[in-house]
Amino acid sequence: MSYARPRAALLAFLTALGLTLGLGATSAGAATEAVTAAPPAGKPAFQLPFACGTKWQLDTWGHDPALDIVKEGNPGSDGLPVYASAPGTVSAAYGNSGSGNTLQISHGNGWFTAYYHLQEAPDAYVKVGGQVTGATQIGRVGKSGAAGDWAHLHYEQRYLASGTFTDETHRRPVHFGGVEYSGAGRQWASVTSGNCAQPQTAPYQPWNCPNGSVCFYSETGGRGTVCKTDRNVPASTCGLRTSFFNNGNPEAGSDHVYVSFAEGGTSCLHHGWADGRGDFAAGGRTIRSVTWGGECS
């Protein structure tokens, strides 16, 4: 499991005394030195599960060979996007009191990755059986489960020759870009994500629409960027092509949508920017229901 630890302050104090007490290297050079052991034959070319070129801090803490990962310098990682480490198939999505919102991805040849403490429900971005690549956003960094009040990604690479579900007994040393990052009590303070093979624009999925929102997509067929939600965005120039309402179960529709609010009142969202713009000011109201229909009155 992954918990916040007052390690940095303790290390600073011990360093001043010239002590380490087995907490790991205290010098910057030793702390960031990467292990150069090559990955075993057949292991996928895993990359850091984050945006191309971003920098991250990796720690093994007390659960080597797993890693806890935060933004370089740990300025706050809550809500940052998490991507798949390599192409594969989502094999499990579940909640757990320890690992929180958890995903497992099967990458073939018996290799899996596991992602703990995600912010949203584990199937908010991808579904079991869905295909992913390094360009697929699978969630966001969070602190669900036993993460304490420390937003971070607990990450594992696992090997199991057969089966679709793995656990922590199947953990193996982690490789990113062919470089191994393992060893008890180790830290790598600045590792750059090489997850750059494909553009990381989160692919459209109906369930990407935030819970309680009405979402409009900028391209035909319900694809492209979200251009309206439950907030009024008068500067937007996108028209309503296909839209989705998400109150836990996304429902598809098109052209016109009638929204009823729990606090009373309704709004009709119209097709296109020029004739109604398809927007409304939420004002903190709760969406109760949505009906897809004809022309707004």
Image: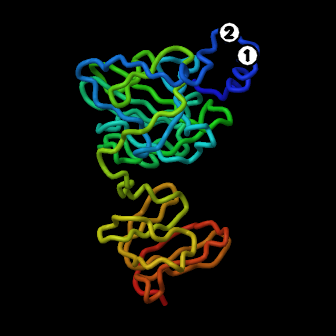
Where residue 239 appears, as percent x and y from the top left, is 40, 78
- State the residue at coordinates (63%, 14%): 23
Residue 112 quadrant: top left
Disc tally is 2
Q: Which residue is mark 2?
A: 21
Residue 138 in view: no
Where residue 20 appears, as percent x and y from the top left, is 67, 12
At numbered mark 2, what does the secondary structure look like: helix, strand or loop?
A: loop
Instruction: Give left or right: position of 264 versus 170.
Output: right
- State the residue at coordinates (62%, 19%): 26
Give whichever of discs 1 and 2 has the lower sequence position: 1
Q: Which residue is mark 1?
A: 14
Residue 117 in view: yes
* Labelled pair 1, 2 in contact (Cβ < 8 Å): yes
At label 1, which amino acid type do we have? Leu
Q: Is residue 39 above or below residue 137?
A: above
Query: Mark number for residue 291?
Result: none
At label 2, which amino acid type do we have? Leu
Residue 106 quadrant: top left
